[in-house]
Amino acid sequence: MEKDYRTASGKFWQTVRRLRRGKQLSANTIYSGGGELLASTGDIVGRWKEYFKDLLNPTDKPSVEEPEAKDSEVDSFITQAEVTEVVQQLLGGKAPGVDEICPEYLKSLDVVGLFWLTCLCNIAWRSGTVPLDWATGVVVPLFKKGDRSVCSNYRGITLLSLPGKVYSRVLERRVRPLVKPRIQEEQCGFRPSRGTLDQLYTVHRVL
């Protein structure tokens, strides 16, 4: 562990967390929506699919504003400089998506590799469609607390394609200056350099 800490603090803390948790048992059964206990693998997988489908597809959808005229800078071709900057900011040690491409693979790309990744991004941008792997996420349920057989006692994280994330991040960086004036100052979620501590501080000051 001492060696892990000196060479890679991330690996060190992963080891610490694993030792603290100890052995964690996975649920061999899960309750259906109607309260029936499911035991077969097929039924359990089907229940998880049903649960996350209902959770992530609410019936009440927010209203969407009509888009304004396109900005020439936003609508222009994606440059290799944009892609390179986003790739350099990727964090290592993250789980890959369905395509099994790790961030380390992308960060090790040379100029030629970054050129072809930029070409893929431009094909997606101009066609309005993305590769299937970019649009496919692997949902992993993580246990929180309570009964392990109850789906609502888990939170799901979605593992997405890293090349798809690069493409999404490039687009997000382009539209951010246009969207920022419309965002309320109180919003901290999904905004850089803001988080829970900012909200807690605000509440503390108000109270």
Image (cartoon, rainbow, N blue to C red):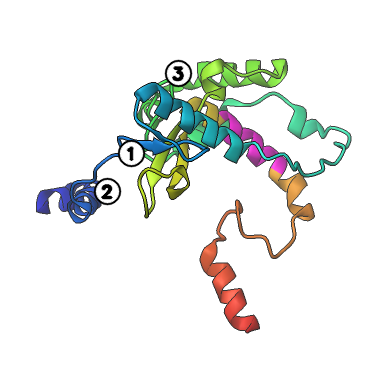
- Residue in view at x 69 percent, y 65 percent: 186
Which residue is found at the position 48% from the left and 47% from the top? 152
Work out whether mark 2 precedes mark 3 in sequence or the reverse, and give the earlier one. 2
Residue located at (11% from left, 51% from top): 1
The residue pinned by badge 3 equals 113
Residue of label 1: 93
Look at mark 2 in the image and give the residue it sits on. 10
Label 3 residue SS: helix
State how far apart marks 2 and 3 are (Cα). 28 Å
Q: Badge 2, how many Cα within 10 Å: few under 14, some, many 20+? A: few
Q: Is residue 49 left or right of residue 75?
A: left
Question: From the viewer's perspective, is 177 left or right of 30?
Answer: right
For the magenta stretch, what is the residue range?
Answer: 167-175
Residue 33, image x and y in percent?
Answer: 52, 38
Amino acid identity at mark 3? Gly
Q: Is residue 89 visible?
A: no
Query: As drawn, is 126 to the left or to the right of 2?
Result: right
Cβ atoms under marks 2 and 1 closer than 8 Å: yes
